[in-house]
Image (spheres, rainbow, N blue to C red):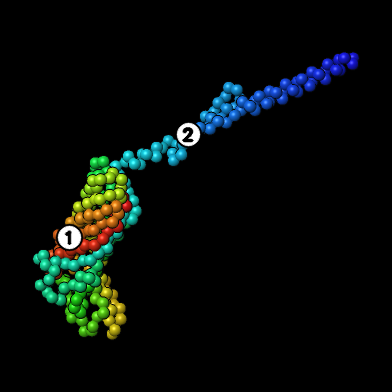
């Protein structure tokens, strides 16, 4: 009986040790190996589970897909800031002396709210378009007051001295230009030129006058501005900075409702964000 008990104890100890050895063997075989682009997890001696993890990539989507698309859209497509004036038969001197402007104080500001770009050839030739707002601020040399609600553009001489005398037009615009960038296929890099057309629809007009006697006076009206306008647009620059010029082929005022004047604007652009 004593020998039987001893044998049972030995078998129990061997069984425990065998289980421990199997557990250790299993633990040794349950390993995780990492690679540069994947992780392999081994569960036991025969079962392998491979998980592939790649940085910058989502499941079912190739991150380079966007770069291959010929279209590109962005908010805040650029701004123009510069000077403006109008031409009377190609001359800055108007036939009516009262309509002459202070060029150094007459300004143009454009904000392109949404921009789009279509790649035509190797990102060197593109067709760019934008939707934005354009302000033309005409500052008169003489103290005249444009009149609202008139069938033709009409003004009267001011009876007081004006420290500020401005006539403003505000258009929603659609510029469409061809973009050429010869040295680099990367956007916003290198020398580029643009040329195209600019189309606009009148939103409002306004006068703003300041005098000691009346303070600040603003009047809103269309002031006989042309409802639809169109012109040519050009830019030459490097990276995001360029010099722009605009010349509107349509008259400033509606046909038969004002003097035959054309607008010209020029200045600096921060563009090419598309």
> Compared to 10, does 49 lie above or below?
below
Mark 2 lies on a secondary structure that is loop
Q: Quadrant of the N terminus?
A: top right
Residue shown at 61%/28% (left/top)?
30
Residue at the image point whose x is 68% and y is 25% from the top: 23
Q: Relative to 189, does residue 9 appear above or below in the rendering? A: above
Does residue 261 appear in this view? no
Q: Which residue is mark 2?
A: 37
- Mark 2 and mark 1 in contact (Cβ < 8 Å)? no
The residue that appears at 83% across and 20% down in the rendered structure is: 9
Residue 26 place in picture, x, y as percent: 65, 25
- Vertical relation: 25 (above or below) 108: above
Which quadrant of the figure has residue 250?
bottom left
Mark nearest the camera among 1 and 2 is 2
Q: Residue 87: percent from the left, percent from the top?
A: 14, 66
> Considering the numbered disc 1 on the image, is that residue within a helix, a strand or a loop?
strand
Which residue is the site of mark 1? 247
Image coords of residue 151 (percent x, y) = 16, 71
Q: Residue at x 86, y 17 (%)?
A: 5
Which numbered circle lies on residue 45?
Answer: none
Of 198 and 242, the residue lying toward us: 242
Q: How many marks?
A: 2
Q: Residues within 10 Å of mark 1 (few under 14, many from 20)?
A: many
Q: Quadrant of residue 205?
A: bottom left
Mark 1 or mark 2, which has the lower sequence index? 2
| Residue that protrudes farthest toward the right in the picture | 1
**Quick check: 17 left or right of 230?**
right
Whole-number angstrom distance, CA of label 1 to CA of label 2: 56 Å
Whether residue 8 is visible: yes
Q: Foreground: 58 or 269?
A: 269
């Amino acid at each position: 009986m004593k020998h039987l008990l001893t044998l049972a104890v030995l078998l129990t100890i061997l069984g425990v040790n065998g289980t421990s050895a199997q557990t250790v063997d299993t633990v040794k075989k349950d390993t995780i190996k990492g690679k540069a682009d994947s992780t392999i997890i081994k569960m036991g001696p025969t079962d392998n589970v491979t998980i592939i993890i790649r940085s910058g990539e989502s499941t079912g989507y190739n991150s380079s897909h966007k770069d291959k698309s010929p279209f590109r859209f962005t908010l805040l497509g650029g701004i123009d800031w510069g000077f403006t004036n109008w031409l009377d038969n190609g001359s800055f001197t108007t036939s009516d002396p009262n309509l002459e402007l202070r060029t150094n104080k007459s300004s143009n500001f454009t904000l392109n709210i949404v921009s789009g770009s279509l790649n035509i050839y190797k990102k060197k030739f593109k067709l760019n378009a934008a939707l934005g707002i354009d302000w033309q601020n005409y500052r008169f040399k003489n103290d005249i007051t444009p009149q609202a609600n008139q069938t033709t553009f009409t003004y009267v001489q001011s009876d007081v001295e004006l420290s500020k005398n401005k006539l403003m037009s505000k258009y929603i615009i659609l510029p469409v230009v061809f973009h050429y960038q010869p040295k680099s296929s990367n956007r916003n890099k290198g020398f580029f030129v643009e040329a195209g057309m600019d189309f606009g629809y009148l939103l409002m007009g306004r006068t703003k006058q300041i005098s000691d006697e009346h303070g600040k006076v603003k009047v809103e009206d269309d002031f006989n501005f042309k409802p639809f306008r169109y012109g040519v647009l050009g830019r030459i620059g490097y990276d995001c900075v360029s010099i722009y010029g605009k010349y509107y082929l349509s008259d400033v005022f509606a046909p038969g409702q004002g003097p035959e004047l054309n607008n010209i604007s020029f200045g600096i652009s921060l563009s090419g964000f598309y």
